[in-house]
Image (cartoon, rainbow, N blue to C red):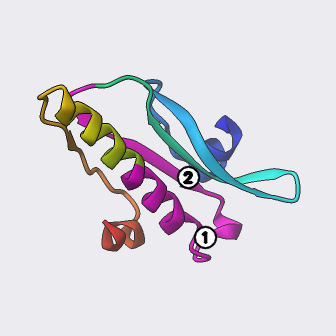
Amino acid sequence: MDALARRVNIRVSTSKAFFCGHLYQVSLVSALFTEDSLSDCFSFDIVVDPQHQAKGLGGVLVDEALEYYEDLKNMMFEMFVEYDYCVHVINPHMKTLL
């Protein structure tokens, strides 16, 4: 997972843990990292290998992240806590998805 992020030159925060991804043959080619603890807002990082970009993998992982966020938000709502998500995007294509 770290090797994929290094190949793409993206630094994944140490506060995030691997959530899910896509394999091609035996290699991880995309990964979603989410906060591993509840904080004031939900944050995630997505990494896609350059050879597998523009194939929809990032979009699928965004959908996974937002679905997970909704689950967390509902859980927080039951505890009467407001829960938002933070958006910091470096990829122009990803910016259009969000």
Identify the residue at image location x=60%, y=52%: 8
Q: Which residue sits furthest right?
A: 25
Q: Quadrant of the C terminus?
A: bottom left
Q: Residues within 10 Å of mark 1 (few under 14, many from 20)?
A: few
**Where residue 22 sits in the image (x, y, percent)?**
69, 56
In the figure, is residue 80 to the left or right of 92?
left
In the figure, is residue 8 to the left or right of 42?
right
In the figure, is residue 36 to the left or right of 6?
left
The label shown at residue 94 is none
Which of 62 and 1 lies nearest the eye of the viewer?
A: 62
- Can you identify the residue that label 1 sits on? 53
Which of 41 and 89 lies nearest the eye of the viewer?
A: 41
Report the amino acid beneath label 2: Val
Report the amino acid beneath label 1: Gln
SS at badge 1 = loop
The label shown at residue 47 is 2
**Where residue 35 sits in the image (x, y, percent)?**
41, 31
Q: Quadrant of residue 23?
A: bottom right
Q: Quadrant of residue 90?
A: bottom left
Which of 85 and 70 lies nearest the eye of the viewer?
A: 70
Q: Is residue 34 magenta?
A: no
In the figure, is residue 2 to the left or right of 58?
right
Identify the residue at image location x=44%, y=61%: 63
